[in-house]
Amino acid sequence: MSTPLSILLLVTDQQRADTLGCVNPAIRTPHLDRLAAEGLRLDRLYPPTPVCLPCRASLATGQYPSTHGATHNHSALPMDYPKVVAQAFTDAGYRTHMIGKSHLNPCHGAGSPEAAPLIFDTARYRDWHGPWYGFEHADISVGHSTETHAASMHYRVWLEDRGIDPERFFGHTAYAAYGVWDLPADATSSHWVAETTIASMAAAQAEGKPFYIWANFPDPHNPCCVPEPWASMYNPDDLPAFGFKPGEPDCFEDKPPFYREILQTEGDYAARYSDPAMPGADNVSHFEWTERQRQENAAHYYGMVSLIDEQVGRILDALEVSGQAEHTLVVFTSDHGDLLGDHGLWWKGIFAYEECLRVPGIARLPGRIPAGAVTQALTGLLDLAPTFFDFAGVAPPPWLEGRSQGAVWAHPDEEPGAGAVVVEHRPWSTAWNQRILVTRTHKLIVYAGRDYGELYDLASDPDQIRNLWADPRHHDLRDQLMARLLSAEMNRRPVNPAVPVPL
């Protein structure tokens, strides 16, 4: 009798696609590089939306935000939402466990189960470990690095059990801060996530069950504060240059008005727009930082990634030692990217640049996914759930809006995969919303009810400098891509047919 397949989904928060050592020699990620060498690297992987909560709700449900309804960071996925991926694996006999950052509910605002004061009630979290959105087990937190609410929920219990006073190390930096953090290195949330994941894998083995574990690292999200030695690991002068690209910001004159408006107001979420349906700065900001500040911030961000890499290495080693690696599908990715000052912008949101859309992607399954392979097939994070069900041989629920990429992962040299992927973004509870169609060569960005739009030739203009939307020479292409996007929206499915996984 064959051993059932286990699934380990490792998700970071706000990690750019170019922060893997195997694609960027300026960063050191030896354990992730090893995972890629033993599996498949997904070079063009996109989230269904470029901000935290709605993307995580989409990973939990396998649906677009416009379907499950949690469309921005102040919305919520209902606690009793019936269509969740984990429940299908729980029902199939898997040990299911969500670990680390949850953020399926707002982390600010009275009454949210993932906001103060509830998240600081350690007595509650000592006794409660699930269920949570279909997962039978839960060890969760919310928030990032030095934020006050980052020392929350089960992570707060873990800190206190180790003699760490959260008041001493959390809540003392600005949201845009970067620098050395005096928190002990073995007390970071990344260390906690790895430790909890390793324990959960061992528990599944002891129970004789396959596992579906979704482990969420809260880093490398700002504030970019990290303990030593990672804080000093990178020389800012040795990193790629972050900031405006050649032709910027002059080219913003040919883009939607919010490009120019956000540059006019410096600070955390300080921008105010002329469009009445855009009440605030979404999840993106502009700072008048010097070149040195940009590079120093990025150096600490890189350090956070390297810290995560070390913890991923611990998890991979535990899989090997336990004998579980041969029958575990490991997938590493992130919920969205980070602008890091590129294009004069920080963080993520309504600017549909590759830096905040594309995320790292690695999939490893010995014997079924070729080692050292790379695919340029366009893939969405919504494709993960149906691919998991396919590889595991578990019947997928009918409401998934992604498509299995099993054949692409098993035969990346033979299967071209998707020809396009759809990203959507509705950052406020207003009529303003954005739809993005990414093809192998172009990107179309449509704004509902607005005359403006964006069209770029990614093959010749990867920095998205020249907006072709209003160029008569590209109207036919624009209309063709509009029709393709509309078809995908009406069908509530990605733009390509499913490809079954080979057994």
Image (tube, rainbow, N blue to C red):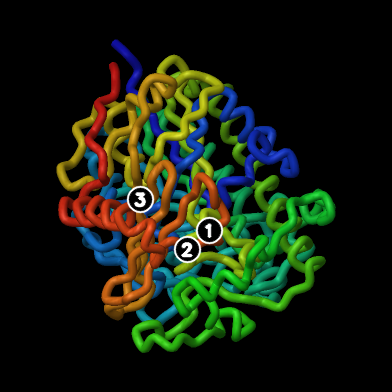
Describe the element under mark 2 as helix, strand or loop: loop
* Picture coordinates of residue 396, whole percent (x, y): 21, 37
Residue 464: give its label. Answer: 1
The residue where tag 2 is placed is 467
Q: Which comes before the other along the chain, label 3 or label 2?
A: 3
**Nearer mark to the viewer, of 3 and 2:** 2
Q: Is residue 206 left or right of residue 447?
A: right
- Return the mark for residue 59: 3
Mark 2–mark 1 CB contact (< 8 Å): yes
> Which of these two is toward me, 207 or 56?
56
The amino acid type, in three-letter code, at marker 2 is Asn
Looking at marks 1 and 3 on the same chain, the residue that comes earlier in the sequence is marked by 3
> Looking at this view, is 44 or 165 the one in front?
44
Position of 257 compared to 483: left or right?
right
Residue 323 versus residue 135 in the image, above or below = above
Q: Position of residue 236 (x, y in %)?
A: 81, 56
